[in-house]
Image: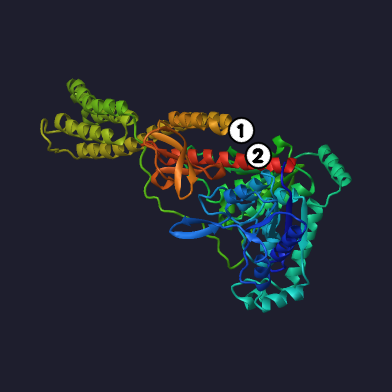
Amino acid sequence: MRGRLHVYLGSAPGVGKTYAALTEGERLIDAGADVVVGLVEVDDRPDTTRLLSHLEVMPRRTMTYHGASFRELDVEGVLIRHPDVVIVDELAHTNIPGSRNEKRWQDVEELLDDDIDVITCLNVQHVDSLNDAVEKLTGLVQRETVPDDVIAAADRVDLIDVDPEALRARVGRGEVHTADAAVALDRYFVPENLVALRNMARHWLADHVLLTPDRETEECTAAAADSGPVVAALTGAPEGEHLVRRAARIAADERRELVGLHVRAASGLVEAEPAWLDRQRRLLVELDGRYIEIAGEDVAGAVLEFARAEGAAHLVLGATRRSRRYELLHGSVINRAIRAAGPVEVHIVPSGARAGRPIQARSEWKGFRPRLALPGKRLLAAWVLAVLAPVALTIGLVPFRSSLGVGGDLLCVLLAVVAVAVVGGVVPAFFCMVLGFLLGDYYFTVPLHSFRVDHLIDIVALVVFAVVALVVGALVDVLARQGVRVAGAQAEAEGLARLLAESVGSPPDARSELTGALRRAFTLDSVAVLRRAGETWEVDASAGSPVPDRPEAAPFSAALPDGDVLVLTGERLGDPEAMLLRAFATQLRLQQERVQLARIRDR
């Protein structure tokens, strides 16, 4: 059995959602139900505090993060108490890292799965697909959202709304929690905004909650006849969330699939992932979309080729942030996409950033990236070659000294420098260059068998040789290391792909095999999954040693579904490996959220 979900959806803060939820709790108690309050924010409101005093309130769980204490919903305590009904406020809340679940709506899903009815509240700006529209209307940035499917799957959704002037009066009397009531009345709680928010909430309810079976069947049948997806082209720019939500609304209106596409430049270099791309991937999952990543030098061509291959009906692009001069030099992706789109309908979404509010990327100084270490056997072979090759070449060319001259000898030694750089990198190649320089000076310049040079042409030859050998050796070193990195990355990516295929849908007891396979794929010292146990961490599954006792003690850690953390230790955890592993952990988390949302929709 599964519990029933009752949602109070507010058109704006202060309309009385929490009061309505507590009033419903009192009514259910009078009807004989066992009702408790799991978590409610009263914000010093007398009426809410009075109602709360009549109900049983569950103790909250205190958690510590970065030295500060926070009080969160005690999911385990509610499960043990197991009331008929629990009231949980602020459904869109994000839990403190290390909590049982990342989001409070996931806590609520866990309670519902244990056959506990839940009464909860949220405002219209917390609805995922409406978040950017509310931000554009009011100027309020709200990052905490709830997937539309979670709210739409509720057994009952009540819209809580009051007259705009009555709500403004509440704000003016200080009955609504705001930092500055006067500023709030002038900016957010203006009558036009409140009316627009009310209409937005009503339209969303009509589209998602109040569909009759006949209308739903009719729309699904129409969609089946023309089922091309809506493709949103993501660059990883901060306004990508705005673009995803706009594409989701188009997909919802026409009952089409939502696809997010990111084109990664096929440069062959290891590049950092755009800072906002992870949030956009997760938003796609919450909006029932799927994420695709492809490589290509021609971004417009790659996007259109994918759209045609998928039979896309709509292509959603973000307005460019590049300068006019850049477009004149490199061309406009949007213009090229529009000209070549053919039957695909192209939508251009303006930037979600408002004038006067600069967008800043989160940045972190990581220092210089360490060079990839080459295998020990290759380095040993390179040093042997760096010593023997110049000596052997010089001895072999001395009989031909009169015809070759110093230039001929140095050209032959340059080949040795390149060979050494290919095998062992720039350091042994530099040694080979110095040794060849000295031997060429000693045996091939006048006067012979000395390090003095009398002829200007010989000085020029030696200097040019040194410069060319250094440049070529450095370039070959980069290519050699890049070749090793690409080979390793390909093997690791193949291993991760197999691991991901095996881990999707795997039962919890399969984690021991997963950690062992991950350790073997990356040749790590240890791989473990840590699970929060009160104020400490316990090992859920592990392979190798030593195993860190907390995520902060590990060189690499990544969040997994259900609040668990994947931790790894080992000397080979460079930036490229960490990037792959973080993508792997992210995909696991997204897959878990997708499964959870699919389960909600199927109910």
Q: Position of residue 340 (x, y in %)?
A: 70, 43
Q: For residue 505, which numbered disc appears in the image?
A: 1
Tell me whether the residue at label 1 lies in contact with that at label 2, contact meaning CB atoms closer than 8 angstroms.
Answer: yes
Q: Position of residue 217 (x, y in %)?
A: 86, 42
Residue sitting at x 20%, y 32% = 435
Residues 345 and 22: in front is: 22
**Residue 349, visible in the rendered structure:** no
Task: Say above or below: 179 vs 386.
Answer: below
**Residue 325, visible in the rendered structure:** yes
Residue 576: name its quadrant. top left
* Mark 1 residue element: loop
Q: Residues within 10 Å of mark 2 (few under 14, many from 20)?
A: some
Report the side of 282 relative to 470 (left or right): right
Report the side of 373 relative to 406 (left or right): right
* Mark 2 residue element: helix
Residues 415 and 1: in front is: 1
Q: Disc 2 designates what residue?
A: 595
Residue sitting at x 63%, y 71% = 177
- Quarter in which the N terminus is drawn: top right
Q: For residue 553, which numbered disc appears in the image?
A: none
Q: Position of residue 138 (x, y in %)?
A: 68, 67
Residues 441 and 493: in front is: 493
The kind of residue on which mark 1 rests is Gly
- Quarter in which the C terminus is drawn: top right
Residue 591: name its quadrant. top right
Q: Earlier in the sequence, mark 1 or mark 2?
A: 1
Report the side of 406 relative to 361 (left or right): left
Q: Position of residue 271 (x, y in %)?
A: 48, 43
Report the side of 295 relative to 393 (left or right): right
Q: Residues within 10 Å of mark 1 (few under 14, many from 20)?
A: few
